[in-house]
């Protein structure tokens, strides 16, 4: 019973502090890439279907820099980029104007 109470308390604690506390902070913030380079890298990633890491600038909803990993595609009816995780369990919609940095994700063998 105590263990369940502790777990519920920790979830409530995280919800009060915000969802950002559930995820570790990014320690390696990359420099802002030029828009032309971001566009070119996105097109290459979509065409090649290889996994990438996208860093997103702070927005009005979040004051931190976030990283998203997965394969990308373009939204057919908006300027958003669709990032699907490797296990295909999570899908992120990212506004293309908010992208800070893109790099290819090389998997270790």
Image (spheres, grey):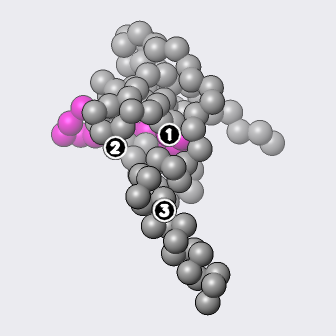
- Which residue is label 3 attached to? 13
Q: Secondary structure at mark 2?
A: strand
Residue 45 on image: x %, y %: 48, 30
Give the CA separation, mark 3 to mark 1: 25 Å
Q: Magenta segment, which residues?
A: 68-79
Q: Residue at x 57, y 74 (%)?
A: 7
Q: Nearer the viewer, residue 2 or 103?
A: 2
Task: Please tell me whether residue 61 belongs to the stretch shown in magenta.
Answer: no
Give the CA separation, mark 2 to mark 3: 27 Å
- Which residue is label 2 attached to? 93
Task: Please tell me whether residue 71 belongs to the stretch shown in magenta.
Answer: yes
Q: Earlier in the sequence, mark 1 or mark 2?
A: 1
Q: Residue at x 36, y 13 (%)?
A: 35
Residue 77 on image: x %, y %: 19, 39
Q: Alpha-carbon neighbours of circle 3 within 10 Å: few (<14), some, or many (≥20)?
A: few
Q: Residue furthest right?
A: 109
Circles 2 and 3, Cβ within 8 Å, touching? The answer is: no
The circle drawn on residue 68 is 1
Q: Nearer the viewer, residue 23 or 72?
A: 23
Q: Alpha-carbon neighbours of circle 2 within 10 Å: few (<14), some, or many (≥20)?
A: some
Give the CA separation, mark 1 to mark 2: 10 Å
Q: Quadrant of the N terminus?
A: bottom right
Q: Residue at x 32, y 31 (%)?
A: 59
Tag in front: 2 or 3: 3
Res. 109 image quadrant: top right
Q: Secondary structure at mark 3?
A: helix
């Amino acid at each position: 019973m105590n263990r369940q109470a502790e777990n519920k308390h920790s979830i409530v604690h995280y919800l009060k502090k915000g969802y950002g506390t559930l995820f570790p902070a990014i320690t390696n913030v990359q420099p802002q890439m030029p828009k032309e380079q971001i566009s070119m890298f996105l097109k290459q990633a979509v065409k090649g279907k290889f996994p990438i890491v996208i860093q997103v600038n702070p927005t009005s909803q979040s004051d931190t820099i976030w990283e998203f990993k997965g394969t990308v595609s373009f939204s057919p009816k908006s300027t958003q980029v669709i990032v699907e995780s490797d296990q295909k369990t999570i899908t992120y919609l990212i506004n293309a104007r908010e992208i800070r940095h893109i790099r290819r994700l090389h998997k270790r063998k």
